[in-house]
Image: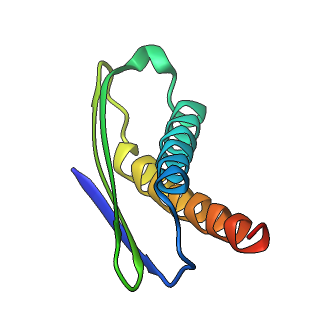
Amino acid sequence: MSKQTINIGVPELNQEQLIEITEYIDYTFKKFLFSKIKPNFIDDIDLRITLDKNDELTLTIDVEVSISSFISNLDQIIQSALINSGKALEKKIRYFKENK
């Protein structure tokens, strides 16, 4: 299992915006993963995205990927997908800040 946590100070976000962020992160993670691994090689993806909103917004992504074929750099691909997902969060936050 791989995990990444990012803390970002953000403006007030409503429930709808938080849902939009999690859906965007989910989409971004899977799009990146499928660009590196053929979807038919992936048996299952368990992606849990948690946003904790206190003084800061904390993003936690837990991911487990089951594959049908050996992929030597799977961990590296997942780590890159997590980094890409963190950038997606930052992009959405900037969007919300600019369109307040």
Looking at the rendering, which quadrant does residue 70 occupy? top left
Q: Where 43 falls versus 14 (above or below)?
A: above
Q: What residue sits 50% from the left and 30% below the top?
A: 37
Q: Where 51 falls versus 63 (above or below)?
A: below
Looking at the rendering, which quadrant does residue 67 occupy? top left
**Residue 31, image x and y in percent?**
58, 36
Q: Where 72 falls versus 79 (above or below)?
A: above
74 sits to left or right of 9? left
**Residue 12, image x and y in percent?**
53, 75
Q: What residue sits 45% from the left and 56% below the top?
A: 82
**Residue 62, image x and y in percent?**
27, 52
Q: Where 100 falls versus 31 (above or below)?
A: below
Residue sticking out furthest to the right: 98
Q: What residue sits 36% from the left and 40% below the top?
A: 72
Residue sticking out furthest to the left: 1
Q: Nearer the viewer, residue 82 or 38?
A: 82
Q: What residue sits 73% from the left and 70% below the top?
A: 100
60 sits to left or right of 81? left
**Residue 25, image x and y in percent?**
51, 49
Residue sticking out furthest to the top: 40
